[in-house]
Amino acid sequence: MKLDIRMPMGVMFVLVGAILTVFGLATSSDVALYRKSLGLNINLIWGIVLLVIGVVMVILARRAMRRSLDTTPPSREGKNEQSGVS
């Protein structure tokens, strides 16, 4: 089975996005922290963006794995039985 790079990258994006989202939610009431970013909760915004990207990558990787399992060639045993060779 081949490793699709989208799976570990997607999991990494989901983990970092979850950390940023939780931090952004926990510090949303701290006005002084977000004064430099024009009052925007950048941690929350980018946490959600990374979560979405990570989930999409994981879904695409699982879809690719499912497709590769569906298109596996038939086993050699079936060919030997059809040709009469044992």
Image (spheres, rainbow, N blue to C red):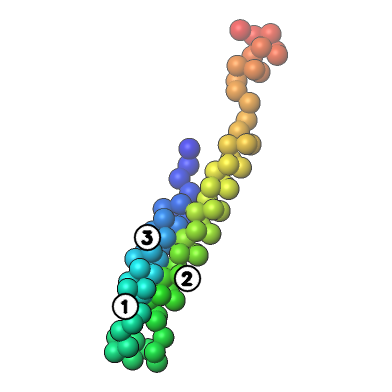
Q: Calculate the distance from the C-alpha at mark 1 to the C-alpha at mark 2.
A: 18 Å
Residue furthest front as drawn: 29
- Of the numbered discs 1 and 2, the one sitting upstream in the chain is 1
Question: Circle 2 — which element?
Answer: helix
31 up-or-down from 58: above or below? below
Name the image quarter holding residue 9.
bottom left
Query: In screen coordinates, is 85 left or right of 23?
Result: right
Residue 24 in the image: state x and y as whole percent. Answer: 36, 75
Q: Calculate the distance from the C-alpha at mark 3 to the C-alpha at mark 1.
A: 18 Å
Residue 71 in the image: state x and y as whole percent. Answer: 63, 36
Q: Amino acid at mark 3?
A: Leu
Instruction: Identify the residue at image location x=37%, y=60%.
Output: 15
Viewer-proximal residue among 66 and 76: 66
Residue assigned mark 1: 27
Instruction: Mark yes or no: residue 74 visible.
Output: yes
The answer to whether marks 1 and 2 mark residues whose Cβ atoms lie closer than 8 Å is: no
| Residue 49, label in figure | 2
Instruction: Identify the residue at image location x=40%, y=92%.
Output: 38
- Of the numbered discs 3 and 2, the one sitting upstream in the chain is 3
